[in-house]
Image (cartoon, rainbow, N blue to C red):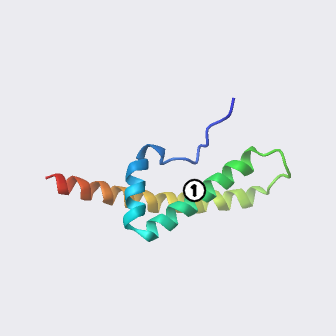
Amino acid sequence: MKRQNKYRKFQLQQKNIEALEKENSRFKRVYSEYENMSNELWNLENSNGEPVPDDFINAMVLQASYLEDEIEDWLLQFNDKKTEIKH
């Protein structure tokens, strides 16, 4: 059984992410970097190849968490904006 990628945190908000990517090129770059880093972390942690030093993986996890925080901020602002438009 294949394990799920724990770094794919934003899958449930895919529609909002797609809308944000269309209207904000910086968000698109940040989200793309987050996806690449998430995939790379997943591959590193689940590969049978050469072991990677924990310091390197920890640095990547830290960078991914910074990107997650930035993405979460954008999504919150986007949701707030959508709520304002409805009212």
In the orientation shown, which residue stands out farthest toward the right?
50
Where is residue 12 drawn, in percent x and y?
Answer: 44, 43
Quarter of the figure with residue 78: bottom left
- Image position of 18 with respect to 5: above or below: below
* Amino acid type at mark 1: Glu
Residue at image x 66%, y 62%? Answer: 59
Where is residue 55 drawn, in percent x and y?
Answer: 73, 60
Please tell me which residue lies in front, 76 or 28.
Answer: 28
Where is residue 9 drawn, in percent x and y?
Answer: 51, 47
Labels in figure, total = 1
Quarter of the figure with residue 80: bottom left
Position of the N terminus, as image quadrant, is top right
Residue at image x 25%, y 59%? Answer: 81
Residue at image x 62%, y 58%? Answer: 37
Where does label 1 land, which residue? 35
Where is residue 65 drawn, in percent x and y?
Answer: 54, 57
Residue 57 shown left or right of residue 36 in the figure: right
Residue at image x 71%, y 57%? Answer: 57
